[in-house]
Amino acid sequence: VSPQGAVLSSTSDAPPLPAGAAQSTTPESVAIGGGEFLVAGTSVGTTRIVAGESVASVGRAVGTIVIAELAIGPVLLVVVFAGALAVGRRVAGPIERAHKRQLDFTADASHELRTPLSVIEAETSLALTNRGGASADEAALRRVLEESRRMHRMVDDMLWLARLEATPTSPSHETVDLVASVATAAQRFRSLAQRRGLHLDVDSDTATPVLIEAPPEWVDRLVGVLLDNACKYAPAGGHVRVSAVVNSDRARLAVDDSGPGIDPAHRSRIFDRFHREIGDAGGAGLGLAIGDAVVAATRGRWEIGDSDLGGASVAVVWPLVGARLHNGGQPKR
């Protein structure tokens, strides 16, 4: 197109170019030869080059691209997902095997340690019994006996925790009455509380069962862990309270004590293995780790706070099982 707008050269089948389109510098829609075109031009020396594209052909091209994206996109997504899954499994395989080896080692080592510890404990008890009176080394023997028993408890805890984590599926869940479990555990810990000068109270309505779905032995272990912790940290003359109640549509197990409580800044760490909030309270720091594993496996949730007794309040809530038991069964006690 000349500077004056005259067409100097065009394709053989090009329709006549409107005069206004010759000076176009940005794409604009122009009616040419009964069709709609997008036309734009640029200056080259003393002439201009003007080019246009049918809007219909552009629409067809866009439609083709959209159809191609719709057709190819899901396929590419599946391919990418499958590739990522394959890579993830390949990477996770060695990690899972290493984790299993670690769990197996912990379980095997704990099992092997139980026998020599039992022998040490038995021999020390026998030596103390046969001595018949005070001696220079009796205190040392008693310390050996006390430490061997502590190590025995720690090994038992490690073995229990390793077996729980190494088991792909948990034991069959049954309907458990928390009220009955609390009463049984409290009876078991009452003599320990008395030896330490503690008041152990059970605050549950024995006429109203509090039912959850869980392996009975796991619930018993959890209640024992919480009571053991409370009895360790409560001072002589202090109070420990355990309760099982219905709270809305939830079952709630709570153990409160009059001990020093748990610093809010440290509450996220109390479930770490071998962590002890108070160094001189005894124990290996595995109890709450075991409790946490049980709570996670039974769809429970922790509630940690301050107790009206002055110490810590450690509670677990679970979905509540309806009062009418399936198949007319009775709750495990």
Image (tube, rainbow, N blue to C red):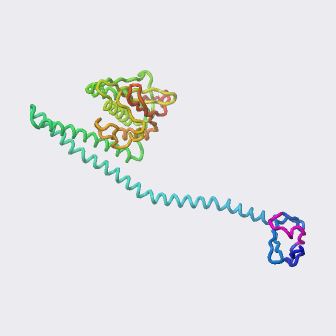
Work out whether residue 2 can be spotted.
yes
Q: Quadrant of the N terminus?
A: bottom right
Relative to 59, does residue 49 appear above or below in the rendering? below
Q: 64 and 257: which one is in front?
A: 257
Work out whether residue 181 can be spotted.
no
Query: Is 20 part of what is drawn in magenta?
Result: yes
The residue depicted at 27 percent of the width and 39 percent of the height is 153
The answer to which image quadrant residue 130 occupies is top left
Residue 110 image position (x, y, % from top left): 28, 46
The residue depicted at 83 percent of the width and 74 percent of the height is 48
Q: Is residue 137 left or right of residue 81?
A: left
Relative to 150, does residue 36 appear above or below in the rendering? below
Q: 302 and 126: which one is in front?
A: 302
The answer to which image quadrant residue 179 occupies is top left
Residue 106 image position (x, y, % from top left): 31, 49
User: Start and end of the magenta stretch?
Assistant: 15-28
Relative to 52, does residue 229 appear above or below in the rendering? above
The residue depicted at 81 percent of the width and 73 percent of the height is 43
Q: Is residue 247 left or right of residue 203?
A: right
Q: 86 and 324: which one is in front?
A: 86
Residue 314 image position (x, y, % from top left): 41, 32
Residue 61 image position (x, y, % from top left): 75, 65
Q: 285 and 39: which one is in front?
A: 39
Q: Quadrant of the C terminus?
A: top left
Relative to 325, does residue 19 appear above or below in the rendering? below
Q: Is residue 295 left or right of residue 48?
A: left
How many tags in the picture? Answer: 0
The answer to which image quadrant residue 173 occupies is top left
Query: Is 260 part of what is drawn in magenta?
Result: no
The residue depicted at 47 percent of the width and 58 percent of the height is 89
